[in-house]
Amino acid sequence: MRDLVTFQLECIECKNSVDFSPLELDAASQLVSCKECNKKYAFGDGTLKRQLKKFAALCLQIQDSQEILGDASVAVTVGEKEVQVPYKLLLTRLKSVLNLKIGDKRTTVVFRVEPTTLPQKEKI
C-alpha cells in the first residue's frame, strides 16, 4: 500500500523532499525523517493524522475502483463547448497539496498516487 500513496513535504532545513506514508503514522513514536539532513517530523495532531489517513484511504479506493473508472469521464463545460476528460487521464494529472505551518514556516505536503495500468478493453 505504501507504494500507491506517498506524501511528500519539503524539508524546512535542507529543502529536499521528505517522503512518507500516512499509513505509517499509527505508532506514537513514529517520526518521519529527512534522508538528507536527518531533520525529524512528528505528526502529533490526532485530527491531522486522521485526515491524512482518510485521504490515503480515498486514494486507495480510487485505485481499487479503476476497473469502473476506466470507462468514466468528467465533463468540463466552458461556454458552449464540453470536453470529457477520462478519469484515467485526470487521475494521472492531478496534483493535490496541503499547505501547513510548521513552527513559524509554511510548507506544502504533496499527495501523490502512483498510477496503475488499467486492463485493455476487449474488442467486440
Image: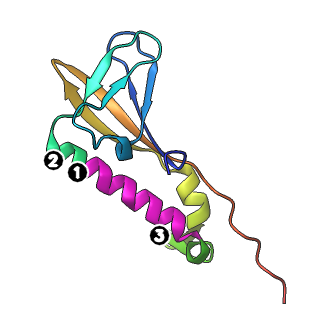
Pick whichever, 37 or 31, lies toward us: 31
Q: Taking 84 as reference, is 10 above or below it?
A: above
In this view of the protein, which residue sits in the foreground, 54 or 96?
Answer: 54
How many residues crowd mark 3 within 10 Å: few (<14), some (14–19), many (20+)?
few
Q: Secondary structure at mark 1?
A: helix
Span shown in magenta: 51-66
Q: Which residue corresponds to the image point at 17% horizontal and 34% vertical from the top-left? A: 44
Q: Residue at x 64, y 57 (%)?
A: 116
Q: CA distance from mark 2 to mark 1?
A: 5 Å
| 3D distance between C-alphas at marks 3 and 2 | 36 Å
Residue under numbered circle 1: 50
**SS category of the residue bearing label 2:** helix
Q: Quadrant of residue 58?
A: bottom left
Amino acid carrying mark 2 in the image: Thr
Which one is earlier in the sequence, the residue at label 3 or at label 2? 2
Q: According to the image, label 3 marks what residue?
A: 77
Q: Residue at x 47, y 69 (%)?
A: 77
Instruction: Depth check: give the residue in front, 26 or 44.
Output: 26
Q: Which amino acid is tagged 3? A: Thr
